[in-house]
Structure formats: C-alpha cells, structure tokens
Image (cartoon, rainbow, N blue to C red):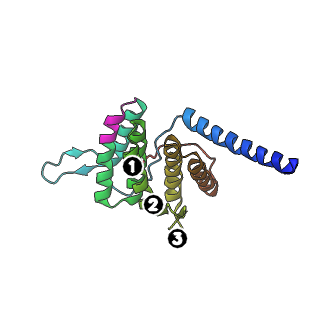
Amino acid sequence: MHPFVLTKKLIRFAVIHVVLFTLAFSLTIIPRTFAKQPQTNSPAVFYTQTTKSLTTTPQQLVSQGEALYQSGRFAEAVTVLQQAVHIYQREGDKLAQAAALTNLSLMFEQLGSWKEASKAINNSLNLLGWDNTNQKLNVNNPKSELLEVLAQTLEIQSGLQLSEGQADISLKTSQISEQIWKRLGKQYVRIQVAEY
C-alpha cells in the first residue's frame, strides 16, 4: 500500500474521532435548556363553566416545568409537562404539544429513562412532520416557528442519541439541526429548551 494512502486514511480516522469526541464533550458539558414554546392564539387563562375559577394554562405548566428543571426536580417536571402535553393535545395545538414533548424528553433523559425519552422525542418529531427514516421534513413551506421547534428537538435528540452510545447518528442529527438554524438566519445555539 502506498504510504500516502495510509497517511490519508490515518488522518481521516483521526479527524472523525476528534470531531466525535468534541461533539460528545460539548454535549456533555453544555447545559441544556428548555425548547422555546411557540406563541399560540389560545387564551392566556381558561375558566371552568361550573365554578368560574381560574385554571392553570399549559403555558404556565411549561413555565413551572422549566423552573422545576432548573432546580433539578426532574420527576416533578415530568408530571407538570405531561399535563401541558395533554392540554395541548386536547386543544389541537400540535406545535406547542411537540415543544412540550421535546422538553418532556429532556426530563426523562435527566432521569435516565431512555425508553420514555426516545418515545417523547419521536412523538414530538412526528407532530412536527419529521421523517426520521429519510431525515427530512414532510411539510411544505414550514413556518419559522415550526423550524425553530424542530431544530431544538433535533438538538435534544442528538444529545439523547449520544447518551445511548450512537455517536455517528448523534453527529448527523446535530448537523441537521445546525442547518435548520442557519436556514432561520439564527446563530446555532446548542440545546435550548422549548418555551410555549
């Protein structure tokens, strides 16, 4: 074998592993935050018909979930975010539901519940119209809000994939997320939690 071919293969091998190590290291030390919740047209508060008392909105639940996340109370955040997901589902607000599921996935990951984290992130991606097999969005002319939630969801999925030992897949997912951020004209910010 020619020495130049061997050197080229050695350099390629080294570069790939340095990139994967850098990604793994950065995903490990960079704190993750909640995905940004899209602005919705739903009312700020809901009133029950029987008592006329004020009920907690899904936006308030997401904010509460973020506060619980910030204080390290992940199990409590799961309960609160599940409530928000159910309300958004009942209202038919798929974008807000997807963002809440993304945050829920992050909570499950923090608890080491990999199966639940994967299920939540996959449900979020399905709601957003993401084709996981072909790694593309099946939505014509997506709005920037959808793309922003998708980019954040893919960032969190990338961290989950890395935690599960899928470094190559994690790198590809992270690159797709970065491309979406560039398309949006925003600076690439690693793993931001969705806000509703």
Q: Nearer the viewer, residue 44 or 178?
A: 178
| Secondary structure, magenta segment, majority class | helix
Q: Residue at x 36, y 39 (%)?
A: 65
Identify residue type, mark 3: Asn
Is residue 150 shown above or below 139? above
Q: Secondary structure at mark 3?
A: loop
Element type at mark 1: helix
- Is mark 1 in CB contact (under 8 Å) with mark 3? no
In terms of image quadrants, where is residue 123?
bottom left
> Label 3, label 2: how many angstroms apart (C-alpha)?
12 Å
Amino acid carrying mark 1 in the image: Ala
Secondary element type, mark 2: helix
Q: Position of residue 186 (x, y in %)?
A: 62, 50
Q: Earlier in the sequence, mark 2 or mark 1?
A: 1
Disc ID at residue 140:
3
- How far across and how far down the image is residue 190, in percent? 57, 42
Q: CA distance from mark 2 to mark 1?
A: 12 Å
Q: Tell me the residue at 75%/47% (across/down).
A: 12
Q: CA distance from mark 1 to mark 3?
A: 23 Å
Can you tell which quarter of the image residue 111 is in? Answer: top left
The total of numbered circles placed on residues is 3
Query: In front: 2, or 151?
Result: 2
- For disc 1, the marked residue is 100
**Which region is colored magenta?**
72-79
Question: Residue reaching furthest left?
Answer: 50
Image side of residue 141 versus residue 11, left or right? left
Residue annotated with mark 2: 128
The answer to whether mark 3 and mark 2 are in CB contact below 8 A is no
Whether residue 44 appears in this view of the structure is no
Give how far across and how far down residue 26 sits, in percent.
60, 36
Q: Is residue 78 above or below residue 181?
A: above
Q: Of 148 and 108, which appears nearest the observer? A: 108
